Image (tube, rainbow, N blue to C red):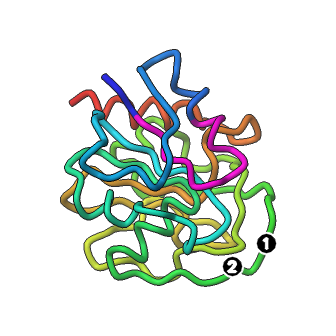
Amino acid sequence: MRILVVNNYGQFNHLIRRSIRDMVETDLISNQTPPEKIDASGLILGGGPTLDRAGRCADYLRDLNMPILGICLGMQLMGTTFGGKVAPGTIGGYAEVEVEVLQENDILKGLPPRFKTWASHADQVVELPSEFEVLARSNVCEIEAMRHLKKPMFGVQWHPEVVHTEHGQELLDNFIAVCKR
């Protein structure tokens, strides 16, 4: 099994790869990689500075039939690709944010009802795409995590790969389990 991490020029993309490399074969790939060249069991869309530097990520979301986890910018790309809306958040920069799990589903399975995360809300999904549901919220963002209703696509605003996020490894393990199905 192989899970690829799409590099969207975020400072933590290498940490995503490092967080899963002991459990699955993984690699960090350019966000300019043609969808037809992606051979994997799952894909993680990493964070990055802006939507306009996201390369072919919208193509991956539309064209690939595999589990996809969007982290920060990756979640925002899911939002815009499927008709949601992204706007600046009330707090910019990285900060500790306590999230409240509304629905465990596959990706948040086994996590506590509330836990601390490390997140940037410079931009965030503010309008949910029609085929998605909210999985978690916080006091600074109503859509901290979401999932597609029919496809194995999940998004989280926070960074599970950083040590400051509680239960981040469990979230990544849950995504790996989805990819193994």
In the image, residue 150 lies at what x, y percent? 18, 59
Q: Where is residue 142 in the image (x, y as percent from the top left)?
A: 55, 74
Q: Work out which quarter of the rendered image holds the C terminus and state it.
A: top left
The residue at the point 35 percent across, 77 percent down is 129
Residue depicted at x 35% and y 59%:
147
Report if residue 10 lies within the magenta region: yes
**Pointers 1 and 2 in contact (C-beta within 8 Å):** yes
Q: Where is residue 67 in the image (x, y as percent from the top left)?
A: 29, 45
Which residues fall within the magenta stretch?
4-16
Q: Where is residue 70 in the image (x, y as percent from the top left)?
A: 46, 54
- View extreme (top): residue: 22
Helix, strand, or loop for circle 2?
loop
Label 2: how many residues lie within 10 Å, few (<14), some (14-19) or many (20+)? some
Left/right placement of residue 169 relative to residue 179 reads right
Q: Is residue 181 above or below residue 114?
A: above
**Residue visible at 46% across and 17% down in the picture:** 23
Q: Residue 92 carries which label?
A: 1
Q: Is mark 1 on a helix, strand or loop?
A: loop
Q: Residues within 10 Å of mark 1 (few under 14, many from 20)?
A: few
Q: Mark 2 points at which residue?
A: 89
Query: Hey, what amino acid is under mark 1?
Result: Gly
- Mark 1–mark 2 Cα distance, whole angstroms, equals 7 Å
Tell me the amino acid under the disc marked 2: Gly
Horizontally, residue 53 falls left or right of residue 56, namely right
Where 11 falls versus 170 (above or below)? Answer: below
The number of numbered discs placed on residues in the rendered structure image is 2
